Image (spheres, helix red, strand yellow):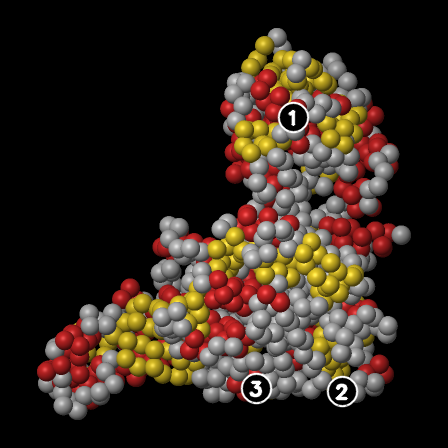
Amino acid sequence: MKPAAFDYARPKEWSEAVKLVGAGARAGAGTQSLGPLLNLRLSQPSTIADLRHLPNYAGVIVAGGVLRIGAGTTHAAIEDGAVPGRIGEIMAAVARRIAYRPVRNRGTIGGSLAHADPAADWVAVLPALGGTAIAFGPNGERRLPLTGFVLGIFETALAPDELLRAVEVPVLPATAKWGHWKFCRKVGEFSKATACVLSVPGAKPRAVLAALDGPPLVIEDASALLADPVREASRVVATVEGLSPWRRSVAETALRHAVEGAA
Amino acid sequence: MTASSDGLGVGASLRRKEDARFLHGQGRFVGDITRPGMLEVAFLRSPVAHARLRGVTKPAGAEKRVFTLDDLPGMGTIRANSALPGFRVSEQPALAKDKLRHVGELIAACVAESRAAAEDLAAGCELDYETLPAISDMRTATAPGAALLHEHWSMNAFLETRRDDDVSGLDAIAAAKVTRTLKTSRQSMAPLEGRGVLAEWDPRLEQMIVTTSTQMPHVTKSGLADCLGLDEGQVRIVSPDVGGGFGYKGILLPEEIVCATLARKLGRPVRWLEDRFEQLSASANCREHHYVLTAWAAKDGKLLGVECEAIVDAGAYSSYPFGACLEAAQVGSILPGPYVLPLLRCHTVSACTNKPPILPYRGVARTGVCYAMETTLDALARKLKITPQAIRFANLVPPEAMPYRNLVGKVFDSGDYPESLRRAEKAIDIASVRKRQAAGETVGVGFATFCEQGAHGTSVYHAWGIPFVPGYEQSSVRLTPDGVLEVRVGVHNHGQGMETTLSQVAHEVLGIHPDRVRVVHGDTALTPYSTGTWGSRAGVMAGGAVAEACRQLSVRVAAIGAALLQVAKDDVVVEDGKVRRKDGDSSVSIADVARTWYRAPQNLPPDVDKGGLEITAGYRPDPDTGTHSYAAHAVVARVDTDTGEVVLEDYVIVEDGGKLLNPMIVDGQVLGGLAQGIGTALYEEMPYDADGQPLAATLADYLLPGSTDVPDVRLEHMETLSPWTTFGQKGIGESGAIGPPGAIVNAINDALARIGAEVMDLPATPERVLAAIHACRK
């Protein structure tokens, strides 16, 4: 199928982009999710605002113990080492397993997060890393915690007239331990269960269970999970409603493997 | 029959001639072809599975760009009959008349300058219909009280077949009896290129020229002429590069009829290109079988009899030309497989449901039947406490029995079936699997053995009474004045490497370098009639026809060459592209012979054959009941008991395709088939809900195996010649897709045996595997 007709806008300034979105335009980044939706005519926006020409849209800036990653930074750039340090290693390993390289070449971290498909990789991983989403609206920047950014299926904390401009993640010590496990029917497919565990010396371990039918489940203190993964994984998964026995089993497995990875 | 001493002929792993254009993006598919003034078509399709159609309201102002059946009078309905007794034939209108019988059925054609604009028109149409209860499950389709798809029928079935051997005494004498209920899922064969049609009316020739992605151009021509009310001289089918067929392109399309009718009515070329959404949601079409299978065996594993109740979901219409019952009605004849089976009782139903019509997919019914039989054999072996190899050795037709006629009358031409299994058994590391099992690992080994009837001809197909019967396959060969050989065939090449193998065949006979052989196919105006490429027939049939035409041409070439050499005809041979004196070194090239015929006829001998250097010859093997290639598949699979994931660790195929015309191409055929077989075994499934809505309308939902999902298979070949074919070659194109589901699920079930779990339904998704495990833990 071919998309229904739409107007194409290429804003040069963030304020212009926000105005377009506020007026009902659909934001387009790498269009790896939006493209198929347009082609299937599941999405029929009157205007698409192509964000790719905005200033500081992509790229990574390190300042004050925080890494600011432009929303337009592609998965491929992250895979290829755009993010420095220990957290860069972690993110590169995650990026490497997002879909296929052609998708990673165009798909962006901000686009994926703002699209908020529950099975998407950054939706699962960023809340585990901690940090902040930088929204930009008519009144300038607004900071939102990544842990509560995705609210549901295709639903985020962004206001209708806001755009995701960047994500900020902490610089991690080399000793930070990380476990990440996801189950895909085949390489490149969307995950059926994703779990991540981040363990930084001196801080409470944090875990996320995602690719559920709703927002990611963030476990701010995963000490119990690390202490008794089998029992705790089972307890955590039992709190999630609506999972089939198979998905329950896969979700428990994901949590256990993520703990093993962070050991 | 060899005139080649340079190793480029039959049996050489010559690189494929056609690959240069594909690898450089120079292939030409329907989607690459445009015409001045061409219009694009989008179809308004049924959103529901079963309804009475009351009317279509066209978008205001677009009344002349949207065409319903009423706007296009004269289009004939598609009628694919069969002579099998009791067959109910469906009437499939090119555009829906008064009923809608499956989601995706064509209702109206919308025409515009671009596809997007044509889709806008389709989206702007309003449909008025009355929904009827959908028949989405083949098992309830024939139940009393079910709504009828075709209201003049007495039940929702195209055909029932029965074979009634008496198996009532087997309970008393059998050492073991097992019954299994097994199901294979509906699949949507997914060639890289979808279908595509470009129709144009040539007023000078008064001819409808249809460029279409088909594997059977001549059959499409007959069917299309019939539906358009044209004589066959007024229809020309061009099938350019075709990006995969597998049976999906072996059908007369309603879209072809509509596009052709529109092109003539509008006086402009008209094109429709199927997209992936249409392919998946409107054309899902094969492999949905349901079996209740009972088998009895003696203590040593020897089969005493099999009883089978089989239903195949044939969808809403009988598609042209293969019809609706090719799968179900073959179940009974394929069930004995490569085994000696004394008794068979079998009842089959070709159910009619509110789904798109089925088409024969690579392997046709064999993939399902082999799955049912092979998993049941393993269940028997487990019950008898013998190995899966042992039960197969006990039943495989022995080589000394060849040619062997089995209980349903199929004749196996040649081969050593047990040897293929012995080699597979040797190649796969069973000992290590058993050791790992003893250590508690959920790993297993599985086997499947089967044979594949290919290139079956007149004697088999006349009994089906479907719209075509394959007869003598023809090839036309012609030397050009510079000595290039043009080889014209009516089969179509769409991945089989035929432009290469048929060049090798010509080279084998005439010694002309394969680079100087041009294989012409895919145009009914340029090629002799053929039923086309299907049923693993082209290597045997077109291979035989090309060889025969070249042989006859060789006689004429020799006569002219002998005259040029001033010796008697009997004193020369044709080899390595030359006519050579038997008793000396002097020779003339075939190019010299061709130049003489065309440009220097004054030098021809007075008794020259006036037919010249162009010959059409026909070929049919005798008998033409088909070759039987066969194979043993062996696989090691590991099962993750937490997720149900199946990992294929090792895969061995021992295959006997008779003489391999090009062993590298045969490898490619087997590997491609294997990937599709793995799809059937583990991934592919087109589910329908109770309302008859397809639930996997994108490739994110309909999973196809990717390159990383196909293990590094180890392939071994045996080459037992068929006594019936030109070079001893056998049809082998479908084989790879037949064995995997049986072998893989047997490996899974071997792995799960320690838990007591068994997988019955395909595909063996993680969810199904885990459900089988959980069922045993309860």
Q: Which residue is mark 3?
A: B462
Q: Nearer the viewer, mark 3 or mark 1?
A: 1
Element class at badge 2? loop
- Give the answer, above or below, for where B256 lies relative to B766: below
The amino acid type, in three-letter code, at marker 2 is Asp
Element class at badge 1? loop
**Residue shown at 22% from the left, 88% from the top:** B609
- Counting labels gives 3
Element class at badge 3? loop
Which numbered dot is residue B165?
A: 2
**Residue shown at 58% from the left, 43% from the top:** A3
Question: Which chain is indicated by disc 3?
Answer: B
Q: Are the residues at dot 2 and dot 1 in contact (C-beta closer than 8 Å)? A: no
Task: Describe residue B752's horizontal placement relative to residue B733 as left or right.
Answer: right
Viewer-closest of B576 and B61? B61
Do marks 2 and 3 both belong to one polypeptide chain? yes
The amino acid type, in three-letter code, at marker 1 is Ala
CA gap between label 3 and label 1 equals 68 Å
- Mark 3 residue crowding within 10 angstroms, few (<14) / some (14–19) / many (20+): some
**Residue shown at 80% from the left, 55% from the top:** B772
Q: Which residue is mark 1?
A: A23
Q: Nearer the viewer, mark 2 or mark 1?
A: 1
**Residue shown at 76% from the left, 42% from the top:** A250
- Mark 2 residue crowding within 10 angstroms, few (<14) / some (14–19) / many (20+): some
